[in-house]
Image (cartoon, rainbow, N blue to C red):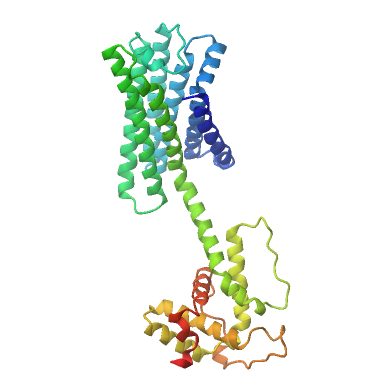
Amino acid sequence: MTGTDYYIPALALGLALTVKMPGLWRTRRSPMSRSLFAILLTSTLVFIAGAPPTVGRVNSIIGVPNISALIVYCILSAFSCASLVLLMHWRGGPEEVIRQHTRRWIAATGGAVVIYCVLFSLSDVPVERRRDLDTYYATTPYIGAMIVLYLLCHTAICTAVMIKCWSWARVLGAGWTRKGLSVLVAGYCLSLGYSILKLIAVGLRWSTGGDRWDYLSTDAAPSVVAVSAGVTMLGFLVPVAGPWSSARFQAWRSYQLMEPLWRALEPWNGPGAPMRIGLTTGIQVRATHRATEIADRLLNLAPYLSPEHRAAAQRYAEAEGYDPDAARVVAEAATIHAALVAKPSATWQNPDHQLERTDNHADRPPVFLSGTHVTELSRYFSKINSTNLVGAATPESK
């Protein structure tokens, strides 16, 4: 892999950190926010620090050959620890138990980092290796032990996180949290594959003494871990971004579904000026505003809605196989359709076109006025001329 192959994932992760930073800062006292910040930061840094150009520059600045390897190992250990801590806080439980487990994992990670530093300081690694340090120094005293220790720790942590995510996902119902856990299982499975590839390459270097299989460590493993980082970040973000995006998609869908009824009722606007919606207004506000406008227009149309038409349309819809709730919506849509055909616009907009009001029982708004009901009402209204609803629109044919 070239430097670009490292810097592109680092840029993507850095952008994710930048986008999340305001929210993380507002909730900086939350252990989950701090853990997510550590995950995003360390995953960004590990790709920057692991890029061959960065490795050479850091080694040159510090003046210690291959010191970058130690830095990368420490950052990756911090990332693994932050992942476990976030997972524990995410799942919840007794606060004191979570704190104890968090302290243990941080202490274990700190101990591992100290051991890495001691082993590296005892090593003799004069030749700079930017891409193949793991296999080149696999048989060298001390640093070889540091490499194996790191890979075993990484393997153990990936396995532990996978088991925790999988066991938790199995007890959860369908939802964004379960989806996020499933993605995390895939991400850490790939990360486990990174460790296994490295261990295979190191083991083969021990047994054969040749570099025939070094590509598993220098080419295959970095590619796998790059994909793993993206999948893992996605897994952590799905439970947060999923509900947010789903709510906006549902609002956009409702906004679109309400358009046929909203346009049909446009002549029934009140005499006042309509409220203006800015270009930057969110889709949820737009959907709420559209539902409110439909409800207001239906209030103006309500005195001209025929209860006899409504009852006949409901009987027709039930005969066509609609369940009672759907039949009521179909009947309301059919009644509105018939009223609009008989009276295309309000009296104050078209004084020459008069229509007598129906009896007092019809002097009321339609039943379906909430946002969800207005969406369903408009959906059936847009289908009122389809074959199976013609009779509902013209119940006198029954």
- Taking the spot 31% from the left edge, 33% from the top edge, the residue there is 159
Where is 86 relative to 330, above or below? above
Does 35 sit above or below residue 338?
above
Residue 156: x and y, percent? 32, 28
Residue shown at 37% from the left, 24% from the top:
108
Residue 295 locus on image (x, y percent): 59, 75
Q: Residue at x 38, y 27 (%)?
A: 220
Quadrant of the image occupied by residue 278:
bottom right
Q: Which one is in front, 13 or 132?
A: 132
Quarter of the image where the C terminus is located? bottom left
Question: In which quadrant of the rendered view does residue 256 lie?
Answer: bottom right
Above or below for 276 versus 364: above
Q: Give the image location of residue 34, x and y in percent.
A: 50, 35
Where in the figure is residue 160, as x and y percent of width and height? 32, 34
Q: Residue furthest left?
A: 207
Count of residue discs: 0
* Residue 92 shows up from this direction: no
The answer to which quarter of the image holds residue 283 is bottom right
As displayed, is residue 258 above or below residue 82? Answer: below
Image-based side of 163 in relation to 70, left or right: left
Res 192 visible: yes
Q: Is residue 324 left or right of residue 301?
A: left
Identify the residue at horizontal 48%, vertical 53% (top origin): 243
